[in-house]
Amino acid sequence: MARGDERIAPSFVLRVWLNDMPGVAVASFLLLLLGGALAALIAAAPPDIANIFADLYLRHVLLFTTLQAALSALISVALALPVARALARRGRFPGRTLLLRLFGLPMVMPAIVAVFAIVALYGESGWLHWLLAKMGLSTGGFLYGLSGILIAHVFFNMPFAARAFLAALEAVPGESWRLASQLGMASGPVFRLIEWPALRGTVASVAGLVFMLCFASFAITLTLGGGPAWASLEAAIYQALRYDFDLGRAAVLALVQLAVSGALLLALHRLLLPAPVSLGLGRAMARPDVAGRGGAIVDGVLIALAGLYVGLPMLSVAIAGSSAAMVPVLGAAATWKAVGIGLGVAAAATMLAIGGALLLIAGGQRLACPGAFQFIGSLPLAASPLALGAGLFVLLTRLGGSLEMGLGLVALINGLMGMPYVMRVVAPAAREAAERHDRLCASLDIRGWNRWRLIDGPLLRRPVGLAMALVAALSLGDLGAIALFGTPETATLPLLIYQQLAAYRLDAAAATSLLLVVLTFGCFILIERLVGGPAHD
Amino acid sequence: MIEAPVMLEVTDVRFLYQDMTMRFDLSVAPGECIAIIGPSGAGKSTLLALIAGFELPESGNIRIDGRDMAGQTPSRRPVTSLFQEHNLFPHLSLADNVGLGLDPGLALDAAAREKVAKALAHVGLAGLEARRPGQLSGGERQRAALARSLVRNKPLLLLDEPFAALGPAQRREMLDLVNALARDRGFTVLFVSHQPDDARHAAGRTIFIEAGRILADGPTPDLFAVPTGPLATYLGTS
């Protein structure tokens, strides 16, 4: 054998190189790009970077960003826990599947549309405001500032957290529930001895992730923050680049953003990205704590309130959007140009994210180090669109580029931001397929294109379709990258809505928001069905 | 003097498994049906994986049908393996699953399709070409995998407990089927089992493996007649 090893060594090395080139190339490209952006930011930052914490404005921005992210995470998790528990306890009721699907929608809802929905619902001319005023409760102008930001962040993250917790609860084996029934456990011990141990890990990672996502929030803090006093880091980067042309300040802000997100990414090593993979199965579990009438009422109220909290903003978009203002919006050439640009950018971003992620996954499996490639593919998560955009902007101006490659950059940033989601959705399925079929494929000599065409392609079709739909939806709803690199000529729908909101053209914003929602959800469903195949069950 | 023909020759093969060095020596004549028994983790599956090329030995030599297997990938060895599960791709029809044994790209002409249908009929699955594995029982799935070994037509059949999940009667039935097919085609069979009864029923020769070594090897009736040492401990007869 030893002699044989020497003989095959050179060709073996060559084969590894040829087979793994694409995966290694993608990994190198990613590392170079992210490293280059980071280096450019460091170079552009003022030399007295140690003094940045003496800067009052920066200290304020950092403090507020942290505060709103922490509160968003805390409230989202605190609300999601009882909601998930109520849903777990009530395994079957009419509309449960529908409700869980509704809980999946905020993930693909453009942030700027959610902003509009919340303004339309809770704002001074919103109908909840009107309803409360009728009941003699004055809410004042509470929407802009911290409370508005929190309402929007909880709208996005509570449903996601509830679904993650529900999945953890439904993973409790049926035997545990039978045992609890036999032992006569009441609601309290059930939570302490069964539910909390099952939830603990998920609670920690979901809280960390929500903090991270809200720390990098842009559209919501920019529009609902309502001024410099409520600016987040992302909004401040935008301000510094687009209005103050202060590269040094933008670089410092972006570096702080990257440092915090990077540290969090490392801390949450088993990071749980929102992935709408498993809906609650609705298994009726023989739980000992579901019989009481009082519990049923509490659960019913909790579930109804959560459904209203998520459903009402969606409904208000539909109602406010289908007005007479729809006619001029649909008739405007600018609208359709924005639709076309958005679709083009989304298509490029989706191909980039899915192609890059698949090559990374394949490279990781061939070189037997999937963990390292998975980590590299998840790295963009440590960046945010604005921080990454600031880095690329500085890098390109140093290399002599110009902002005219704007849309290409937007697609690149959206593709990079989507890559971690693709890794999260596709990598586990790819790993399972490899574990099950590697030996059989090796013995039948099924490899290369044949393996993808006959085995991996069909088996990974559903997760790949889901991942592509997700990236396309995220790109269509992106405001961060397009706000940084877009011009009036290259606006997408989210940028158009932002401009309409800023100009207080609420009717137009309503109509455009509805159009964007229909476009985003439509694309999501279309791609998921076309690529992923018809829905099972 | 003419040397007896040899189908499989395993010579001083060493393999490091966790912190145990396994060492195997084995010689198998064409047409033999051999049972491999022994406790969990003893190295039964590892021996089959080494022969099939899924694992590479630290040292030693494996010859199949007179050819040295060093540097040969699993697909280039004259071997068909049946695993405990996942022998079929869940998303492909039975015909495609069997057809992969003829061409890894599934480029099958009418004659090849005919061959596949015949093989399925041979294992008692006539007319089920279009079924998916999920629509079959566990026993039927392993029959389909056997049909693929027929179209592959490799002389050495390695069974790594593919019938472990079946009941005693069905297990015997499957082993009878394997034996009948092997006689038809002149296949040589090695099968791993946890049931000494399987060895008594189907194997002319039995190998007992413990802690990475072959500790007993001989005609099945002799081995079970007066078991001694570790084999007796394993069988619970000492």
Image (spheres, coloured by chain):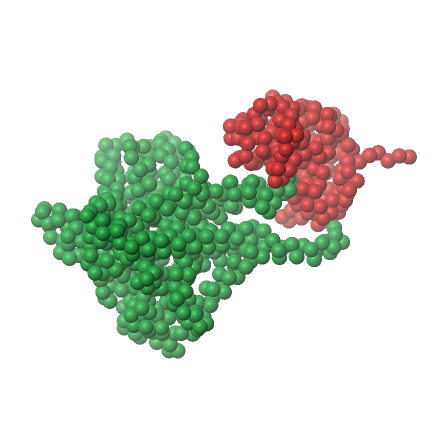
Chain colours: A green, B red
Residue at position x 43%, y 55% in the image: A348
Residue at point 49%, 52% (across, down): A355
Q: State whether residue A492 appears in this view.
A: yes
- A189 up-or-down from B238: above or below: below
Residue A289 placement: quadrant: top left
At x 46%, y 46%, the residue is A464
Point out residue A113 in the picture as x, y percentages from the top left corner.
27, 52
Q: As drawn, is A58 to the left or to the right of A1?
A: left
Q: Which residue is more in the foreground, B209 or A339?
A: A339
Residue beneath the point at 34% across and 62% down: A486
Q: Quadrant of residue B93?
A: top right
Give left or right: position of B143 versus A373: right
A192 sits left or right of A453 in the view: left
Q: Position of residue B4 (x, y in %)?
A: 84, 34
Picture layout, residue A176 above or below residue A114? above
Name the quadrant of the C terminus of chain B: top right
- Residue A267 in sight from this viewpoint: no
Task: Say how many tags the image has.
Answer: 0
Q: Is residue A250 above or below residue B6?
A: below
The residue closer to the viewer here, B219 or A3, is A3
Q: Quadrant of the N terminus of chain B?
A: top right
Q: Nearer the viewer, residue A35 or A286?
A: A35
Q: Residue furthest right?
A: B1
Residue A496: percent from left, percent from top? 28, 57
